[in-house]
Amino acid sequence: MTLAVDPVVLCDSLSDTVASPARIRDAALGGQDNYAADRDALRELDEVAPGFPDLLRVVRAWHVRVVRHLASRGFGQFLDLAAGLPAAEDNTHQTAQRQNPDAKVVYTGTDNLVLSYERALLDDNDTVHVVHADGLDPHALLAHETVRATLDPAQPVAVLMTTGVQDEPDDERLAAALSGYRALLPPGSALALSCWAPPGEARLLSGAIERTWASRCHRKIRCRTENAVGRLFSGFDLLDPGLVRLTDWWPDGPLLRTPPPAHQFALGGVGIKS
């Protein structure tokens, strides 16, 4: 997908030497909104962690399944944190509104590139909005005038952190954010999150991925262990099949028969606040 956006607004995101996380993901998904620096970063990540582009595609496919499943369960409000560049199809609002035409979606983020593309895509949709806000500051985000005007605070909200919590390396800040959502959202709300978490035999890949990402994107990430990811769901009851490798998360079946090798690199789950 290629959309016309204001280059002045995007000046902080348009570097031809520093890779962008959003554009790396776009490159892995076969998009056109990326640069040589992003494609080079993706190739290097594939060298240090073979199958890494498949990991990003697995995360995207899991996100679509999660949104579809939650919408089919009756969820009509979605808060998509740091959603990334829009895809050609199956964006959060499109997936949710196929199941529930009245579903409302708020996309959030701090990357001007992503936000401008999202706004261009959503120009004619008055049930979907984009706000410039830090998804790890739930008090400020839920008090934002657009969020308050779009989402009913008395009704359950699905909070989506499906691109991965590895983008926040600070455990304390991440835990505080999740605690904030748990306290502020009404019962029945959902938390969906994934994190890069290579299993025991592949744990050495974590360091290689983190170093390469920091070198290419000039920002830190943190892969986590299964126990660390599990603790993030404190206060939420996990839906079946629990916290699992992403290609094993099929609450309505079927399991993917031949998952790519990189399916082992990430964990994901969906929890409900009781």
Image (tube, rainbow, N blue to C red):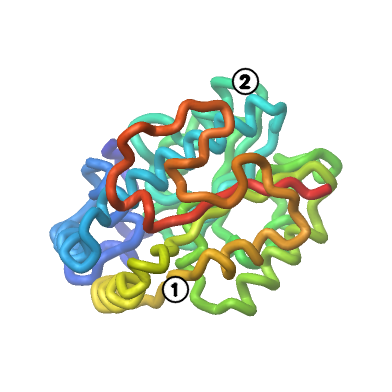
Residue at the image point whose x is 56% and y is 27% from the top: 252
Q: Is residue 139 above or below residue 53?
A: below
99 sits to left or right of 188: left
Q: Quadrant of the N terminus?
A: top left
Q: Tell me the SS state at disc 1.
A: loop
Q: CA distance from mark 2 to mark 1?
A: 37 Å
Residue furthest front in the image? 201
Q: Tell me the SS state at disc 2.
A: loop
Looking at the rendered image, the disc whose residue lies closer to the viewer, 2 or 1, is 1
The disc placed on residue 174 is none
Q: Is residue 270 above or below residue 209?
A: above
Q: Amino acid at mark 1?
A: Arg
Q: Earlier in the sequence, mark 2 or mark 1?
A: 2
Residue 184 location, quadrant: bottom right
Q: How many marks?
A: 2
Dots 2 and 1: beta carbons under 8 Å? no
200 sits to left or right of 48: right
Residue at the image point whose x is 47% and y is 66% from the top: 166
Q: Which residue is mark 1?
A: 222
177 sits to left or right of 235: left
Residue 173 location, quadrant: bottom right
Q: Residues within 10 Å of mark 2 (few under 14, many from 20)?
A: some
Q: Which residue is mark 2?
A: 101
| Residue 152 drawn at (x, y percent) | 79, 40
Asked whether 82 or 228 is in front, the reply is 228
| Residue 266 drawn at (x, y percent) | 43, 56
Q: Amino acid at mark 2?
A: Pro
